[in-house]
Image (tube, rainbow, N blue to C red):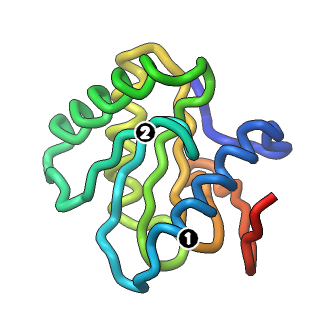
Amino acid sequence: MDSGLVEPVDPRRAALLRRAVRDHALAEPRRVFPARLHVGTPGGGQRVLSLDEPTDHALRTDVVAAMLRRAASEAAPGDVVVWLTRPGALDLQDVDARWLAASLAACGEAGRPLTMVVVNRHGWRDPRTGTARHWKRLRRR
C-alpha cells in the first residue's frame, strides 16, 4: 500500500506539485474562496470539483473514483495527482481528512497508488506524512 510522499521527493513529482502551487497562486487572487478538489496532472489535463461537498463518505469515494478514471485516461502513468486547494494554513483540517479517506478508498478499489497533497498559495503538504514544500514567492522557471 502507498503510504504517501517521503523525503527525498522524486524531482519529477516535486516539479508537478510545485506547478500545482504556482497555478493555484496565479488563478486564485482572493483570500477567501471555496475549497476545490483537483484530479489529474498539474499544468495538464485535470478535473476540478468545487467542494460544496457531499457529506457522505461513499459519495465522496465515488466522486474521486470517477475523476480518477477520467484523469487516468488522459495522463501518463504516475502523473495523476489528487490535490485539494483551499485557503488557510496547510495544517490538517477536517476537509483534508474527509477527502483523503475518500481518495484512499477510490485508489484502493482501483489498485493504484495515491499521491495526494493539500495546496495553498505558498506550498503543498502531504496529509499522511507531513512532507511539505513552502515558498515565500514562487517564480516561473
Q: Determine whether label 1 and label 2 are within 8 Å by CB.
A: no
Q: Residues within 10 Å of mark 2 (few under 14, many from 20)?
A: many
Q: Which residue is mark 1?
A: 25
Residue 24 in picture, x, y percent from top left? 52, 64
Q: Residue at x 40, y 57 (%)?
A: 96
Q: Is residue 118 left or right of residue 95?
A: right
Q: Is residue 57 left or right of residue 100?
A: left
| Above or below for 58 versus 83 | above
Tell me which amino acid carries mark 2.
Gln
Of all residues, the one furthest to the top in this rendering is 111
Quadrant (top left/top right/bottom left/bottom right) for the N terminus: top right
Q: Residues within 10 Å of mark 1 (few under 14, many from 20)?
A: some
Tell me which amino acid carries mark 1.
Ala
Q: Secondary structure at mark 2?
A: strand
Residue 116 in picture, x, y percent from top left? 52, 44
Res 106 → quadrant: top left
Q: Which residue is mark 2?
A: 46
| Above or below for 117 versus 89 | above
Q: Residue at x 41, y 28 (%)?
A: 71
| Nearer to us in this view, 26 or 21 | 26
Q: Residue at x 59, y 28 (%)?
A: 2
Lower sequence index among marks 1 and 2:
1
Q: Secondary structure at mark 1?
A: helix
| Above or below for 37 versus 58 | below
Distance between the alpha carbons at the discs numbered 1 and 2: 17 Å
